[in-house]
Image (tube, rainbow, N blue to C red):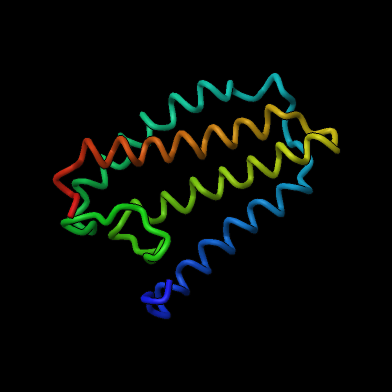
Amino acid sequence: MENKTTKEKLFLSIRLLIILFGLVTSLTVVQPVPDYQLPSPFLLFVLVPAIFTIVIGVQFFNPISDSTWQPPSWWLNPFNISQPYQFSHLAFCFFLASGVGLAISSTYSSNSLKYGLCQVALGLGGIVGINISQYIYARKNP
């Protein structure tokens, strides 16, 4: 961490604050939907990578996107629209952290564990989707 620039440290701090915000706020959330209206966490874990791969495929042809995409990094700007992996990585880590918070809050509140597991599955599925799309769209890799 000693060799990192101030800008890179700022981006790391921003990412960590957003993820921490997702974790902390989810500890106090009241479940907005009943269990029977929630999808299966396994189904989310399977579908999210497939859907993400299709969505990122559209970005592959987007003229705004850079000719090469940097792999997800905690040190890069997550709001750079020409680097789609950066924001996606932040978003999926946010979902993962909020799912962990919801799962924890289900132990002391009326929230069900399934709601938290759906968020965790969304986050993990998205991270898997990023890895799959890096393989599929390897021409964009540096």
The image quadrant where one finds the C terminus is: bottom left
Judged left or right of residue 38, residue 70 is left
Q: How many marks?
A: 0
Whether residue 73 is situated above or below residue 130 in the rendered picture: below
Q: Quadrant of residue 39?
A: top right
Whether residue 51 is situated above or below residue 140 in the rendered picture: above
- Looking at the picture, tell me which residue is in the foreground, 134 or 56: 134
Q: Quadrant of residue 103?
A: top right
For image coordinates 42% across by 50% down, the residue present is 89
Name the spot of residue 21 as percent of width and height, x first: 65, 58
Judged left or right of residue 64, residue 16 is right
Judged left or right of residue 129, residue 20 is right
For image coordinates 67% across by 23% down, the residue present is 37
For image coordinates 55% across by 50% down, the residue present is 94
For image coordinates 42% across by 40% down, the residue present is 127
Name the spot of residue 96 as percent of width and height, x first: 56, 43
The image quadrant where one finds the N terminus is: bottom left
Query: Which residue is the extreme one toward the bottom?
Result: 6
Judged left or right of residue 58, residue 88 is right
Whether residue 117 is situated above or below residue 131 in the rendered picture: above
Name the spot of residue 129 as percent of width and height, x first: 37, 36
Whether residue 22 is situated above or below residue 57 in the rendered picture: below
Name the spot of residue 40 as percent of width and height, x first: 58, 21
- Looking at the picture, tell me which residue is in the foreground, 49 or 107: 107
